[in-house]
Image (tube, rainbow, N blue to C red):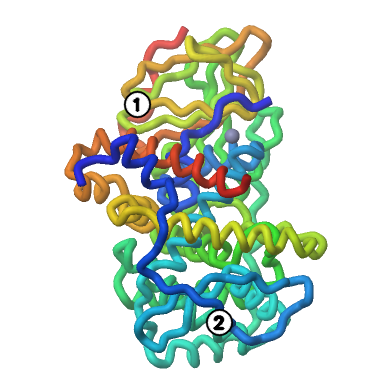
Amino acid sequence: MTALSAPAMIAMMRPVATASRKVHHATFWSGAGPDRLRRLPGKRLVTGRDELAAPTAAELSHLVLRVARSDRQAFEQLFRHFAPRVKAYILRGGAEPGLAEEVAQETLLAVWRKASGFDPAKAGAATWIFTIARNLRIDRARRKGPPPTLGEDPSQQAEAPPPADEVIAAAERDDRVRRLVETLPAEQAEVLRLSFFAEEPQTEIAALLGIPLGTVKSRVRLAMARLRTALEDLER
Amino acid sequence: MIEFHPTDDSLARLAAGTLEAGPTIVVRTHVDGCERCRNAVGRLEAVGGALLNAIEPVAMQADAYALLEARLDRPAPATKAVAPARAVPANGPIELPAALEGLEIGRWRWLAPGVRRSRVTIPGAPDADLVMYRIGPNRRLPHHGHAGSEYTQVLSGSFFDETGHYRPGDLVEADGDVDHQPRVGPEGECICLAAVEGRMLPNGFFGRMMRPFV
Ligand SMILES: [Zn+2]
């Protein structure tokens, strides 16, 4: 891949069929939840191994709501799903394995402690947990002092329980965004991953694309503009 | 009505947590007051969530859950009371943006005729180049002469250049190589929050601030 040409970027934002993946409709997590959390007919990816399928965003939100009621079983499920992913995320930023393990632990501990402030109408669980891990990553990178205000966690302004359809809307957005990201051509997905995960995104993107650092900025800017359009389209 | 917003790239870097400390505060100040950008950042954070979900997991240590479970019953440490933004700088009759909470805000200091500056220090990132300017009507904004992008958020009053008239809530993002020296509007003084990518130059800071003012 040489560059993110405009046509390539348009292609990047056009969902393509994922024919290579089998999809079925087995129920993932069996725990019962509040009635207002309708179960979505989520699509689950099946791998060759006998591995748990990917939970839908609604299921993940539902788990956080159970954690808010101090449900340890739900918490353990969230831990098993997210701790290894947060660890991988922190490792991608260049941290030592010990530090990555520690940040993953701190992130999940924060999930336990802040779950009552989680507002499933504002953000899906993965999004919420990403912002917690992100803030801890910044905090650790600066070593001392609290991180600058990065805005409250998307959940923190909860007032009243949100209407059911709003809960679904936020979770559905997570699912849609996930599908959008999953269907990106590999190289472009890598640029996006670097933008979010790398310690020095622009340097690493320059290396990946083989273009001067100075050119990366406008390319990434273009990519992000198109991504914004694609994200806005998801909500129409 | 907010007319000027951060670039998509800057919003993405805010969401990704890869924007530098100083620009993070300036862009966050804008986003807190701008519904359009708040929504955009929410969507970009959802991309972060999707990427986190899709990442190839790395196994935790075998006893990781047991270790964490043992900590669940311990009370959370009392959250350190965030120091209320150390008061409004002397003579600076503005309401400080929430994004400045917990930061150290220096006094207004004379920089040039009609131009005063207050340094804002971020705990953990003491060399971030983040300042507030308070500039009299018709004066020019100081020029940073810096390689990195410069982020300027209007808090009160207004300034303008050939590309537009910037009012409270607007954010101007200028590349360092652009000779960008807007002028404050005639209606009154302007207070803005500005950050430049890169570190403060320990000795040259004052010097490079002293490019000619009008
Ligand atoms: Zn905006």
Residue B201 seen anywhere in this rendered image of the structure: no
- Circle 2 packing at 10 Å, graded few (<14), some (14-19), many (20+), is few
In the picture, residue A213 is in which quadrant? top left
Q: In the image shown, does A172 or B80 lie closer to the viewer?
A: A172
To which residue does mark 1 refer?
B176
To which residue does mark 2 refer?
A26
| Above/below status of B106 relative to A158 | above
Chain identifier of the residue bearing label 1 in the image: B
Residue A58 seen anywhere in this rendered image of the structure: yes
Amino acid type, mark 2? Ala
Residue A138, percent from left and from top:
44, 58
Residue extending farthest to the front is: A19
Amino acid type, mark 1? Gly
Residue extending farthest to the right is: A160
Which disc number belongs to residue A31?
none
Q: Marks 1 and 2: in contact by CB < 8 Å? A: no
| Above/below status of B129 relative to A78 | above
Total count of labels: 2
In the picture, residue A124 is in which quadrant? bottom right
At 58% from the left and 19% from the top, the residue drawn is B166
At 69% from the left and 25% from the top, the residue drawn is B1
Name the secondary structure under disc 2: loop
State the quadrant of the C terminus of chain A. top right
Name the secondary structure under disc 1: loop
- Circle 1 packing at 10 Å, graded few (<14), some (14-19), many (20+), is some
Q: In the image shown, does B14 or B101 lie closer to the viewer?
A: B14
Residue A4, percent from left and from top:
29, 40
Question: How far apart, in angstroms, are the residues tagged by discs 2 and 1?
Answer: 54 Å
At 57% from the left and 8% from the top, the residue drawn is B138
Q: In the image shown, does A85 or B164 lie closer to the viewer?
A: A85
Chain identifier of the residue bearing label 2 in the image: A
| Above/below status of A38 relative to A225 | below
